[in-house]
Image (cartoon, helix red, strand yellow):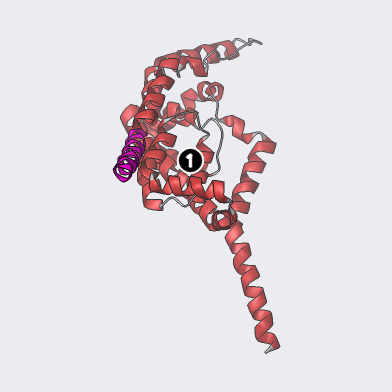
């Protein structure tokens, strides 16, 4: 009997550890990249500096390069690397906007799905059960209008991608809805960044050639002048925001109808 009791005590502890293991791995990888500075590799400057080598590799190994890019994007999203958008821009330069867009959507959706699984299997259930009335109300609203809210969060670029990947899992959004709204919701922004990347390919190539010439000449102030503002314009951000607001129209209409029905019912009762 004592042996059975001991085994039953050990098993829940093992299950608890296994439940938290994915989150621990993600946290450790993020910490390593942050402390070593490896996450800073994703920058426009490094893109320019490595342009020639990357272009040659893609030209010689297109299929391998494309699969490697998708795998890298899955990792970048799953471990929440900052400036993952640089990958999207780079893919537009090397693969063309539509191939790059499709590859990025696949990679980003799979990476987001990994984070959903990590959040839902580790702390998601515990937080849902221990949440107060306010959070429970938000959870109920999120689940009732999951499609509209998910599309809004995906379309509007005002929310950190990591939070948008994790919060729905904590609030109990169905995975199927989470998956397809991610797939659809990130498409406009993804294709826009990939298209912008293809559009600045000549600029990146010119800067790469100038940098190589400057370095070969022994220059001490060789640098890169390409910046985020050259790619992402205020008009582009406004367009994403408008798309996000449009996705909330079903929620607004539902509330209007509900209020009208409530008003009509009160009027009928008073009459």
The image shows residue 203 at horizontal and vertical percentages of 44, 14
Residue 263 lies in the magenta-colored region: yes
- State the residue at coordinates (47%, 52%): 172
Residue to which mark 1 is pinned: 72
The image shows residue 158 at horizontal and vertical percentages of 49, 28
Taking the image as shown, residue 100 lies to the left or right of residue 222, namely left
Asked whether 199 or 211 is in front, the reply is: 199
Q: Which residues are magenta?
A: 248-271
Residue lying farthest front?
271
User: Which image quarter holds the N terminus?
Assistant: bottom right
Residue 67 appears anywhere in the view: no
Residue 137 appears anywhere in the view: yes
What SS does tag 1 mark? helix
User: Which image quarter holds the C terminus?
Assistant: top left
The image shows residue 30 at horizontal and vertical percentages of 62, 42
The image shows residue 5 at horizontal and vertical percentages of 67, 83
- State the residue at coordinates (68%, 86%): 3
- State the residue at coordinates (59%, 51%): 132
- State the residue at coordinates (64%, 39%): 33
Asked whether 220 or 106 is in front, the reply is: 106
Taking the image as shown, residue 141 lies to the left or right of residue 32, namely left
How many marks the image carries: the answer is: 1
Q: Which image quadrant is residue 224 in?
A: top right
Q: Is 160 placed above or below 113 here?
A: above
């Amino acid at each position: 009997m004592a042996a059975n009791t001991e085994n039953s005590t050990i098993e829940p502890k093992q299950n608890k550890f296994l439940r938290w293991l994915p989150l621990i791995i993600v946290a450790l990888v993020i910490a390593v990249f942050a402390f070593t500075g490896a996450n800073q590799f994703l920058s426009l400057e490094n893109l320019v500096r490595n342009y020639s080598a990357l272009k040659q590799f893609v030209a010689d190994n297109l299929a391998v390069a494309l699969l490697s890019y998708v795998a890298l994007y899955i990792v970048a999203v799953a471990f929440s690397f900052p400036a993952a958008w640089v990958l999207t821009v780079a893919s537009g330069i090397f693969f063309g906007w539509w191939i790059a867009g499709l590859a990025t959507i696949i990679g980003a959706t799979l990476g987001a799905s990994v984070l959903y699984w990590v959040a839902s299997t580790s702390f998601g259930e515990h937080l849902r059960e221990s949440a107060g009335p306010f959070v429970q109300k938000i959870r109920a609203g999120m689940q009732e209008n999951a499609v509209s809210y998910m599309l809004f969060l995906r379309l509007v670029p005002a929310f950190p991608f990591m939070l948008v990947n994790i919060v729905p899992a904590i609030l109990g959004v169905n995975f199927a809805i989470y998956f397809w709204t991610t797939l659809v919701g990130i498409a406009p922004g993804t294709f826009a960044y990939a298209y912008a990347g293809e559009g600045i390919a000549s600029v990146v190539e010119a800067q790469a050639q100038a940098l190589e010439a400057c370095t070969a000449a022994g220059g001490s102030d060789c640098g890169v002048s390409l910046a985020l503002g050259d790619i992402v314009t205020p008009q582009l951000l406004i367009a994403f925001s408008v798309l996000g607001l449009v996705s909330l129209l079903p929620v607004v209409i539902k509330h209007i109808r509900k209020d009208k029905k409530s008003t009509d019912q009160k009027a009928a009762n008073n009459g």
